[in-house]
């Protein structure tokens, strides 16, 4: 007679996988809930520390989700205020969404919803808009190893609206930063890269009224650490340490004009830009009018040394430059600069010098940059 325990044993064996799955699901749910609780606890503690330093962050409505394989933070009506800055700065965005995968929590991806209102004490607020703004961070938030930002369809304009002109626009902006050596807490050396496609800034300078395509790579040295601090304080710290930005390669294209540059930049004790870039330009005759050469030529006091140098090289050349502005100066600079080739076109290599904030292209003073702190 067959044993009655055999069917029961078979049913038990069939139930084992199901029980194992249920146990694993319960354990995973417990782990996920605990991780979310710890994340909220750490976020609250971080906000308290930041508030004590004069930086406050808030959400109109905050939710956590993403079960079972992601951690997601959603923040509607996100805002931040930096009271420790001088002047005070406040930001307000439509929403913020942050995602991290359970299996790779060291990589976080955040998307910020437009518009973003930026209010600086004593100035009219501006509004930034975009179709996509995504930020990725590799490493733990207090000590990131790499940060990247991509922004599509960017525009910045006065928050008041109306017929005010757009301050800045770009089809696409990419910014990347990586700790190449050192640590976030001690003497970091930062690799930097930027790509700006169809960038315009109509109110900034005649040269930025038409779209510019810019790519640049560089290395920033001289930082003590990457602790949050106001930008002016950061720049003062950088200057005091003798820090410099090594521009490995920068490339600018606007229509038929192409320029590449490399060199090193620093800051003076008064916060003015100081350094030199070797610039190779194809289409120099198109650049000079945009730099305001026609307006600069009559100011003999500013240009006398440059025009005198042209006269010494070729008698009468300085006089021709005075009479024919852009064309004459382009011809004179071609004699002073070094002939080169860029993308199969004739080009000219000249020093672009920053001396106490003043900007010189070869011997010509073409502009000035205000103190950065």
Image: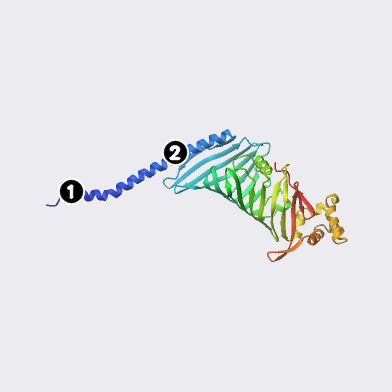
Quarter of the figure that contains the C terminus: top right
- The residue that label 2 is drawn on is 37
Q: Dot 2, crowdedness within 10 Å: few (<14), some or many (≥20)?
A: few
Disc number for residue 5: 1
* Side of 293 relative to 35 (left or right): right
Task: Estimate the x, y position of residue 76 in percent, counting from the top left.
Answer: 52, 40
Q: Earlier in the sequence, mark 1 or mark 2?
A: 1
**Residue under the image location 72 percent in, 60 percent down:** 281
| Rendered view: 83 above or below 296 | above
Q: How many numbered marks have been drawn onto this rendered protein structure?
A: 2
* Local secondary structure at mark 1: helix
Q: Specify how the rendered protein is coloured.
A: rainbow
Disc number for residue 270: none
Q: Can residue 36 be seen from the camera position used here? A: yes
Task: Estimate the x, y position of residue 261 in percent, counting from the top left.
Answer: 69, 56
Task: Estimate the x, y position of residue 60 in percent, counting from the top left.
Answer: 53, 37
Q: Nearer the viewer, residue 275 or 176?
A: 275
* Side of 335 relative to 204 (left or right): right
Q: Can residue 166 be seen from the camera position used here? A: no
**Residue under the image location 70 percent in, 48 percent down:** 266
Distance of label 1 from label 2 (alpha carbons): 46 Å
């Amino acid at each position: 007679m067959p044993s009655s325990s055999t069917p029961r044993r078979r049913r038990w064996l069939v139930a084992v996988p199901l029980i194992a799955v249920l146990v694993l699901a319960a354990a995973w749910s417990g782990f996920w809930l605990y991780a979310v609780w710890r994340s909220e606890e750490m976020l609250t503690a971080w906000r308290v520390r930041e508030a004590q330093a004069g930086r406050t962050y808030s959400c109109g409505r905050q939710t956590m989700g993403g079960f079972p394989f992601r951690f997601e933070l959603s923040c509607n009506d996100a805002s931040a205020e930096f009271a420790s800055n001088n002047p005070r700065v406040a930001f307000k965005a439509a929403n913020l969404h942050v995602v991290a995968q359970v299996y790779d929590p060291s990589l976080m991806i955040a998307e910020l919803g437009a518009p973003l209102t930026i209010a600086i004490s004593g100035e009219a607020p501006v509004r930034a808009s975009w179709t996509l703004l995504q930020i990725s961070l590799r490493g733990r938030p207090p000590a990131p190893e790499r940060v990247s930002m991509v922004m599509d369809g960017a525009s910045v304009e006065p928050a008041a609206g109306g017929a005010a002109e757009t301050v800045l626009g770009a089809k696409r902006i990419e910014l990347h930063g990586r700790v190449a050596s050192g640590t976030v807490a001690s003497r970091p050396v930062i690799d930097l890269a930027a790509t700006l496609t169809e960038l315009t800034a109509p109110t900034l300078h005649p040269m930025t009224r038409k779209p510019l395509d810019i790519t640049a790579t560089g290395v920033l040295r001289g930082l003590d650490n990457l602790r949050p601090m106001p930008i002016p304080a950061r720049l003062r710290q950088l200057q005091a340490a003798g820090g410099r930005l090594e521009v490995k390669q920068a490339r600018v294209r606007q229509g038929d004009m192409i320029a590449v540059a490399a060199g090193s930049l620093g800051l003076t004790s008064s916060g003015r830009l100081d350094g030199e870039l070797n610039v190779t330009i194809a289409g120099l005759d198109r650049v000079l009018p945009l730099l305001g050469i026609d307006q600069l030529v009559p100011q003999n006091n500013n240009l006398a040394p440059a025009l005198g140098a042209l006269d010494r090289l070729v008698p009468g050349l300085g006089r021709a430059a005075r009479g024919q502005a852009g064309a004459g100066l382009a011809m004179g600079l071609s004699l002073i600069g070094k002939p080169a080739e860029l993308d199969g076109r004739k080009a000219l290599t000249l020093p672009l010098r920053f001396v106490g904030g003043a900007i010189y292209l070869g011997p010509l003073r073409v502009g000035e940059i205000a103190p950065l702190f």
